[in-house]
Amino acid sequence: MTSQSLTAGNTGPKIWFITGASRGFGRVWTEAALQRGDKVAATARQLASISYLTEKYGASVLPLALDVTKPEQVKAAVAHAHAHFGRLDIVLNNAGYSLVGTIEEASLDELRALYETNVVGTVAVLQAALPLLRAQGHGHVLGVSSGLGLVAPPVLGYYASSKWAFEAIHESLAPEVAPFGIKVTIIEPGAYATEFGSPESLRFAASQEVYTDFKNHFFADLRSMERGDPAATPAALFAVVDAAQPPLRLFLGSHNLAQVRAVYAERLATWEAWETVSNAAQGAVS
């Protein structure tokens, strides 16, 4: 595939629907899209957190209050945005948070709440938007996952699991909606210096003393990680939405690929080492 075919898509002004626009990547990408001349329906739980956008960008932005865990509110917001702008070219599911704690520490209620936002809330947006995108004959779904959508570390296992589910949903979605002119891309950022570490984006499970030393070492390693500059990411996002043939998955940052190569090499080696046992479990062919 040539570089020309990658970037030969529609490069005119686009209309975005973005969840979680008040902070982190959502805020960076909302402003970057507006600055390049696109229009954005920007959503956040608290309308006051994005009200400044109207003062700065005028009629190019439509701020909307949206809690993705409330399906009726999701339907109303998506319909409002579509009616207001006349179409939606890009639906960017960015709202989400991380649950920090070992598998034993986090409560079932905390796990349910995490999935309500990161998985069920995402699906609510998709199911509200897809009939509109299908009717208009085009659209691009962007799902913000993480490098942890492919690799699950300790202490962040539940967050990673929500992103594994998120990735499976979008991977299944892509061939389902391709006949209707709808494209799907999973965005997988590595570690970035965003507000994702803020109290609004992190929930901590109650600690058990038995895990204290392990978690202290884990957090020390986490703090030492090199973090990317969020302001460097919009160009990559725009390359994807302007491409004639956008990828199903896109890493953001320079560290994910090396890590995933190593992890997948180890997985393949394990499967191959146990191939004889696995094949014997097939049983007799009738």
Image (spheres, rainbow, N blue to C red):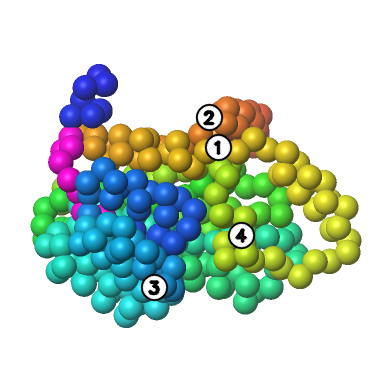
Q: Are marks 1 and 2 in contact (CB under 8 Å)?
A: yes
Classed neighbour count for the residue bearing mark 3: other residues with Cα under 10 Å, few (<14), some (14–19), many (≥20): some
The extreme top residue here reads 2
Circle 2 crowding by C-alpha within 10 Å: few under 14, some 14–19, many from 20: few
Drawn side of residue 85 relative to residue 95, left or right? left
Quadrant of residue 10 in the image? Answer: top left
Spatial CA distance of label 2 from label 3 is 34 Å
The residue under the point 56% across, 54% down is 195
Residue type, numbered disc 2? Ser
Q: Which residue is mark 2?
A: 254
Q: Secondary structure at mark 2?
A: loop
First along the sequence among labels 3 and 4: 3
Question: Residue 228, which numbered label?
Answer: 1
User: Where residue 68 appears, x then y in whole percent?
Assistant: 40, 71
The disc labelled 4 sits on which kind of residue?
Ser
How far apart are the two marked residues, 4 and 1, measured between alpha carbons?
17 Å
* Residue, disc 3: 47
From the image, tell me which residue sits under label 4: 198
Tag 4 secondary structure? loop
Residue density around tag 1, few if under 14, some if 14–19, many if 20 or more, within 10 Å: some
